[in-house]
Image (cartoon, helix red, strand yellow):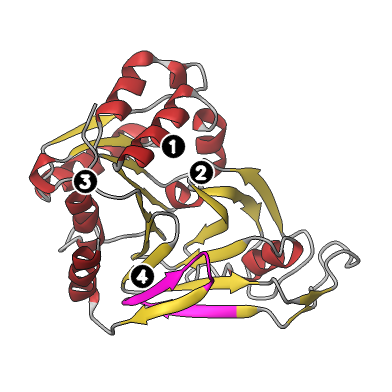
Amino acid sequence: MAAPAHRPTLLIIGGAEDRRGRSSILRRFVRLAGGKQATIAIIPTASSFQDEVSSAYAEVFARLGARTCAVVDPRDRSEASDERLVARLDEATGVFLTGGSQLRLSQVVAGTPSGEAIHRAYRRGAVIGGTSAGASIMSEFMIALGDEGVTPRQRASQLSHGLGLLPGVVIDQHFAQRQRYGRLMSVIAMSPNLIGIGIDENTALEVVDGITATVLGRGGVHILDCRAAITDAPDARTGAPLLVSNAVVHALPAGATFDLDKRVLVDFVEKHLDAGISQAGARA
């Protein structure tokens, strides 16, 4: 079993991260996983092209200095119980979940021995990274299906259970690029005890101990808080625009650090992409 590297850390990526250039977000993942000592387990289950996706990420991680990469690719819940796959996760210093369908990923991995191994890896200090679908599944509940658009509407989304690595939140990805503000706001308005986190493409939220969240990358992160909001969600008809008043929305660029427990901004240092990631590394 790999030795703990640092405090429990998630690197949640909004999708379409740079894999060809400097690859700063993925470089940060490799650094958190141990750099030249990194042993990375790639889980491509969400994708419809598992072999191609696995090869692409293995190539990137090798270029960025990781020591080894192993593929953990269960095709169904039975395979997710395979002791050989579980062993690869137990040996990893970093686990990376690729994009695709978060519903497929949830149906195959959540609540299986492989899913439990991901939780063990997280607790011992292996960094857990995920992009697109791999980002959505990290939360306790995730948007499995949903309409796009800026206006929140009644029943615009369908929720499913995620891995639960980050309780009390719902994560959405490709946020600005696919206009997903409305669907995330509709979910949080109906469940005001939850926090909504929307992450743009080529952008990541690095979360330490489930609380301290720092934005990295070229886009932004929106955090939605509806604890004090007024809404007609219990009575609105299906498809109708929702009334949501007095919601708190935090728009956070790279360099912003947010406390997910207290739901407040705790720091902001304006930096470009690479410098922002270096600064985050200094805090970790």
**Disc nearest the viewer among 2 and 1:** 2
Front residue of 102/117: it is 117
**Residue 172 percent across, percent down from the top left:** 53, 60
Identify the residue shown where x is 41% and y is 47%: 99
Q: Secondary structure at mark 1?
A: loop
N-term mark: 3 or 4 = 3
Identify the residue shown where x is 45% and y is 45%: 100
Badges 2 and 3: C-beta atoms under 8 Å apart? no
- Is residue 258 magenta-colored? yes
Q: CA distance from mark 3 to mark 4?
A: 18 Å
Q: Is residue 210 left or right of residue 34?
A: right
**Disc nearest the viewer among 1 and 4:** 4
Q: Specify start and end residues of the magenta stretch as a single range.
A: 249-263
Query: Which numbered tag is attached to residue 215?
Result: 4
Q: Amino acid at mark 2?
A: Ser
**Disc nearest the viewer among 4 and 2:** 4
Query: Which numbered tag is attached to residue 33?
Result: 3
**Residue 109 percent across, percent down from the top left:** 49, 30
Q: Is residue 280 left or right of residue 207?
A: left
Q: Is residue 267 above or below residue 53?
A: below
At label 3, counting other C-alpha atoms closer than 10 Å, the crowd grade (few under 14, some 14-19, many 20 or more) is many
**What is the quadrant of the C terminus in the image?**
bottom left
N-term mark: 1 or 4 = 1
* Residue topped by disc 1: 48
